[in-house]
Structures are given as structure tokens and as C-alpha cells.
Amino acid sequence: MTSFGPLLRQSRQAVGLSLRQLATRVGYDHSYLSQVERGQRPGSADLARLCDTELGTDGRLTATFERRPARTGQVRPEPDPMEAAWRGLVGTLDAVATDQLCSEFRTVPPAALLPTVVSQLHGAAPPEAAELSVLIAEILTRLGETSTARRWWWAARAAADSVGAGATVRAREAIIGLAERRPLPELLELADDAISLDRQSYLPRAARALVLAERGRSQEAQRALQELIGIGDELLQAPTYQLHWAEGRMCTLLGYGVAGCVLLERARELCPDSWVGDRALLDLSLAECLTIAGEVAAGIAMSLRVLVELPDEWHDLLVYDAADRVLRHVQTEPGAAELRRLLAHPTYRSGRSVGGGSSQR
């Protein structure tokens, strides 16, 4: 029986699509798809479903992925308390599959996913432990549990350093730290450390560029943006929409409203509809960029739509930070009062004043 990777390649070639064309349609990096087709990565149920839709394979890819052989030594214990999981992070041996969890991270509300991620950490090998620790830290940050999240970021850095992935973890921490409003000098140090560990990859440089722009160091940030644009998507081991999001956010922070809107619209086209939280953040990023470009009414309307239509379980610190950034630009405009009212939602637990936008520079 044909396994998932070869079947994906056969199905793609049957409809005459290149790897890059399929990657664009499903919102994944083409190099990741190449690894899946060659059997170097297992893929995910989310990827299988998206490819079934794009390739017209009538569910065959999903069925094949679900029939894949279980990984030797895979353990799925009952969920452990978070404290026990954190204490047991270092020195574990058996492997678990994190690709499915990484996919679920984008399709399952953070609070609902957290127990599953914590339970999978028990018995994880160092590479999986590092990734799982990052997921836990990001989920806790989104839920506003920032003090607990700091411990998990520390654990993720330690686990990642042991397997040579420290640059990626530090870059991700720096980027999400911007939404948390952590002190910018602290985030810049994280981004600089990430670059010192990996000077070639996209994500560390994107993190540093975003922090520089947030700090108001415009000339350095502009140079960093030019570097990002010149890299291309071959270095980004992530869904390609994130590349356009990073560049669009940079343009917004630097005041390039029209260019930022183009990039963020492209990111929205590439982001799967099932990634509810990611799409909400993209819409709010675009809303802020619209206000920068002079389309204030459109920006406010988009922000209000996101906050009203987004299910409560997806309302988290990242969403409210993105909406708060819109409010900072439209304080006296019609519609600002309604946006401010929606930002008083009970899950907004960051302790910041709405529209304040304060952070140490």
C-alpha cells in the first residue's frame, strides 16, 4: 500500500502542480512538503485534508495519513499535572509525534489544547521536548499566564540548546513577547542571541527587525526589512504566510501603509480558513495597517467584525494586543468607543490600560 508521502507526490503530479504551487495553495512551506513527499517528515492530518481539497483526491490522502504505522515506542499516557510535566522535562528518552500537535495548535482553542500538549511531554525525546515546551509557553502566554509562561520559555530554550534549535526558540519568544509587551531591551537581547546562534535563517532576523521597529530604531529596522525581503521563502521552515505577515508588520510599524496592506492581504490568502486564531490576528494586523494607510473607517470596521465574530474561546492576549494596537491609532474616530468597549472583554487579563500601549523602550 502506498504511504502518505509518495501518494501525495503522485496526486500532485497527476494534476500538474509543482511543489511551490501546492505549497502556496495549502499555506505550507514548499521545502516542508518536499520532506513529507520523500518520507523525511510525517506530515499532519491538517495537511492531508488541505491537499485532499486542492488535489481533488476525495479523502484518500487523509485516509492514508490516518492509516500510517504507529511510531515505535510511542507513549500516550494520561495527562499529568503541569508542574510534574515541567519537572520531568529534562532527561526523557522516548519519542512522540509533535507534527499533529503543531497542526492542532492552529485549529484548537489554546485552553482546550493545553492539557493534550502537557500530557505528550512525558517521555518526549529532546527535539520533541523543545517543541512541546515552546507550544506550552506560547499557549500560556496567549491565556495571560505570563509568569508561568516564563518558566516554560526557559525550559524550551534549555531543551532547544541541547539539540541545536536555540535560535528558533529565542526568535519565537521575542516575537510573542511583543504582544505580551515585555521590555523591548530584553526582547532585543533575545533576538540578538538568536542571530548569534543562526545568522542565516529567516526567523531570528525577522524577530530582530520587528523589535527594532517597535523600539523606534527606524533606520536599522529599514535595513533589516530590506534584508528580510531579499532572503526569499526557501529559508522559512513554516507556513509561507508567516513570511508575508512579518514583512507586513514591519511595513506597518515603519509607516508604509500601502505596502503593508499588500503583504498582509497576501498572508491572508495563504492562511487556511481552519486556522481561526491565526486568521483573526492577520485580520487585526491588516486593520491596523489600513488605519496607517488612511483607511481608518475600514480598519475600525474590520477590528469590530473580528472581535464580534470570533468565538470566545479564541479571545486571548494576542488577539487583544492586536486590537489594542488598532485602537491606539483611532482614539478619537467614530467607532473607537465601541472598539474600546469590546476590548473590555473578561479574557483581556494583561492588566494594561486599553489603548495605552505602554512598554519599556
Image (cartoon, rainbow, N blue to C red):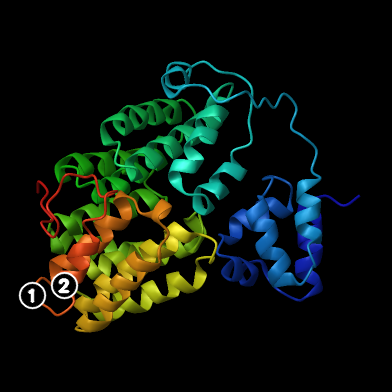
Q: Evaluate whether residue 202 shows in this view.
A: no
Q: Position of residue 136 (x, y in %)?
A: 43, 35
Q: Tell me the element at label 2.
A: helix
Q: Position of residue 321 (x, y in %)?
A: 25, 56
**Few, some or many residues within 10 Å of mark 1 (<14, 14–19, 20+):** few
Q: Which image quadrant is residue 28 in? A: bottom right
Q: Tell me the element at label 1.
A: loop
Q: Which mark is residue 259?
A: none
Task: Determine which residue is flagged by label 2.
Answer: 336
Q: Is residue 146 left or right of residue 131?
A: left
Relative height, residue 210 to residue 328 (above, below) = above
The residue lying at 34 percent from left, 45 percent from top is 142
Relative height, residue 32 to residue 183 (above, below) = below
Q: Evaluate whether residue 324 shows in this view.
A: yes
Q: Which image quadrant is residue 355 in? A: bottom left
Q: Is residue 33 left or right of residue 4?
A: left
Q: Is residue 233 left or right of residue 42?
A: left
Task: Determine which residue is flagged by label 1.
Answer: 332
Q: Amino acid at mark 1?
A: Thr
Relative height, residue 124 to residue 255 (above, below) = above
The residue lying at 43 percent from left, 16 percent from top is 87
Asked if marks 2 and 1 touch (Cβ < 8 Å), the reply is: yes
The residue lying at 53 percent from left, 66 percent from top is 273
> Between residues 263 and 191, which one lies in front from this camera angle?
263
**Could you give the CA–CA distance between mark 2 and mark 1, rounded to whole angstroms?**
7 Å
Q: Position of residue 162 (x, y in %)?
A: 46, 25
Q: Quick one: which residue is furthest to the right in this view?
A: 1
**Few, some or many residues within 10 Å of mark 2 (<14, 14–19, 20+):** many
> Between residues 22 and 70, which one lies in front from this camera angle?
70
> Between residues 12 and 67, which one lies in front from this camera angle?
67
